[in-house]
Structure formats: structure tokens, C-alpha cells
Amino acid sequence: MKTTQLSVNPEKLINSLRFSFTQSTTVLGELMQNARRAGATFVSFEYSQDTRTLTVCDDGCGIACLETLLTVAESGWDIEVIEREYPFGLGVRREVA
């Protein structure tokens, strides 16, 4: 039996996600929702006009499994959150030590 596996070009996928949001501020709402789901009590956004980079920091629990982060359409949330909030299942969290 031959196994075929889906692969994704992460850079192109992330660049394409801008077309998934109807307004430029929608991404901020999604990031806030992710932080809340992760139990964050603090969230900060910092945007650098020079580098056109948005940095988001929060004190949530982070992601337990890196594989979940890299799996398209897998959110890692429990069934209660999935049924209530329909998490998108793609996002990047960077934990700060």
C-alpha cells in the first residue's frame, strides 16, 4: 500500500491567509480569541511600520503539541470549544521563555 501525505508550503499559506479575512482588523479579533481560549489574562500587540511586522504577546498556556500547530484545520481545542466557537485551526503561537 502506498501512502500519500498532504504537504503545505507554510510561507505561501500564511501569505494567502490575508484573503481569508473580510476586514483588515479581523485578524486582530482572531488573535484575541486565540489568546482568550489559551487562558491569557494579558495580550499586547506591537506593530512596526518599518518592517511591517505585527508582534503579539500573551500569557496564555501556549500550544501543547507543535504538530497540531503545523496541521491544517486542526485546532487542538476540546470539543466544547469547537462546538461553541468553530476555531479556524491554523495559527502560529510563539512561546517566550
Image (cartoon, grey):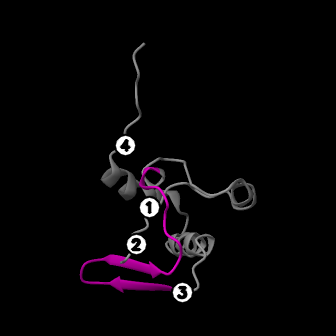
**First of labels 4, 3 by sequence position:** 4
Question: Looking at the image, is mark 4 or mark 1 earlier in the sequence?
Answer: 4
- Mark 1 vs 2, N-terminal side: 1
**Disc 3 secondary structure class:** loop
**Sequence-earlier tag: 4 or 2:** 4
Q: Is residue 46 above or below residue 2?
A: below
Residue situated in front as seen by the camera: 13 or 81: 81
Query: How many numbered marks does the figure carry?
Result: 4
Residue 42 is marked as: 3
Which residue is labeled 2 in the image? 95
Secondary structure beneath label 1: helix
Q: Residues within 10 Å of mark 3 (few under 14, many from 20)?
A: few
Reading the image, the residue beneath label 1 is 18
Range drawn in magenta: 42-67
Disc 1, disc 3: CB below 8 Å?
Answer: no
Identify the residue shown where x is 49% and y is 72%. Answer: 24
What residue is drawn where x is 37% and y is 43%? Answer: 8
Task: Report which quarter residue 3 is drawn in.
Answer: top left
Residue 70 locus on image (x, y percent): 42, 51
Nearer the observer: mark 4 or 3; the answer is 3
Measure the alpha-carbon separation of dots 4 and 1. Answer: 16 Å
Q: Residues within 10 Å of mark 1 (few under 14, many from 20)?
A: few
Does residue 16 lie above or below 53 as drawn?
above
What kind of residue is marked 2? Glu
Which residue type carries mark 3? Answer: Phe
Residues packed near mark 2 inside 10 Å, few (<14), some (14 to 19) or many (20 plus): few
Residue visible at 43% across and 78% down in the picture: 56
How packed mark 4 is, by other alpha carbons closer than 10 Å (few <14, some 14-19, many 20 or more), is few
**Quadrant in which residue 89 is drawn:** bottom right
Split into 4 quadrants, where in the image is the N terminus?
A: top left
In depth, the one of 43 and 12 nearer the eye is 43
